[in-house]
Image: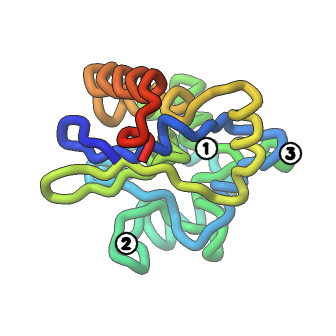
């Protein structure tokens, strides 16, 4: 772990490799698990505002879940998150054949909304936990992403490079530039104290 501004960052995001492999996983992260996508308070307001524009892109089951539960919910642990369909799929999930995609992102890609998707989805496999004084930036290892880890290793793409756009969206370009410097220093430093 190292500190970067008001963040504590896991070295795993610099050392582990990852590239989403949708052809292998079929978007399993949008339909597996026991909770919706984590949201922050600002994102709950955005979802409320853009829902009428995103609604035409969604499945009937997703619309029913959102209209019954709301555009966002308080999860079992009290955190803000996207609603689920029957405690499985994210309510905003749509399918292209057997592959799960984000209905919000489809609306974004077509220029209907100017918000791509929740930043937690955009950042995955990085998870951010906000505390009062700092934010923890960690790599989240999930077996459904084994193919993404294999592809990342094959293409030699570290996690932080794969999610560059999302990290810049969350923390800004200056923070990301500093992260790149730390990554370069770590790569060039073979002393055990840094490798820990």
- Checking the image for residue 1, the label placed there is none
Dot 1 corresponds to which residue? 103
Q: Dot 3 corresponds to which residue?
A: 97
| Residues at marks 2 and 1, CA–CA distance in whole angstroms | 21 Å
For this view, does 174 lie left or right of residue 25? left
Mark 1, other Cα within 10 Å: few <14 / some 14–19 / many ≥20: many
Label 3 to label 1: alpha-carbon separation = 14 Å
Q: Is residue 138 left or right of residue 35?
A: left
Q: Position of residue 142 (x, y in %)?
A: 63, 58
Residue at x 31% of width, y 54% of height? 40
- Disc 2 on helix, strand or loop? strand
| Foreground of the two, 133 or 31 | 133
Q: Nearer the viewer, residue 50 or 1?
A: 1
- Decide which of tag 2 and tag 1 comes sooner along the chain: 2
Mark closest to the chain's N terminus, 3 or 1: 3
Q: Which residue is mark 2?
A: 74
Q: Position of residue 24 (x, y in %)?
A: 83, 44
161 left or right of 146? left
């Amino acid at each position: 772990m190292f500190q970067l501004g008001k963040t504590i960052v896991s070295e795993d995001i610099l050392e582990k490799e990852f590239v989403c492999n949708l052809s292998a996983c079929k978007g399993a992260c949008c339909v597996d698990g026991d909770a919706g996508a984590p949201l922050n308070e600002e994102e709950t307001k955005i979802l409320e505002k853009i829902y009428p524009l995103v609604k035409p892109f969604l499945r009937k089951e997703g619309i029913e879940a959102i209209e019954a539960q709301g555009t966002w919910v308080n999860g079992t642990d009290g955190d803000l998150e996207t609603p689920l369909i029957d405690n499985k799929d994210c309510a905003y999930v749509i399918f292209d054949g057997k592959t799960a995609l984000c209905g919000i992102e489809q609306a974004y890609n077509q220029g209907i909304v100017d918000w791509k998707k929740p930043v937690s989805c955009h950042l995955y496999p990085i998870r951010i936990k906000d505390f009062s004084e700092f934010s923890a930036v960690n790599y989240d290892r999930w077996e459904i992403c084994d193919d993404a880890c294999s592809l990342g290793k094959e293409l030699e793409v570290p996690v932080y490079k794969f999610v560059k756009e999302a990290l810049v969206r969350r923390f800004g370009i200056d923070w990301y530039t500093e992260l790149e410097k730390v990554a370069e220093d770590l790569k060039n430093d073979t002393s055990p104290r840094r490798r820990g």
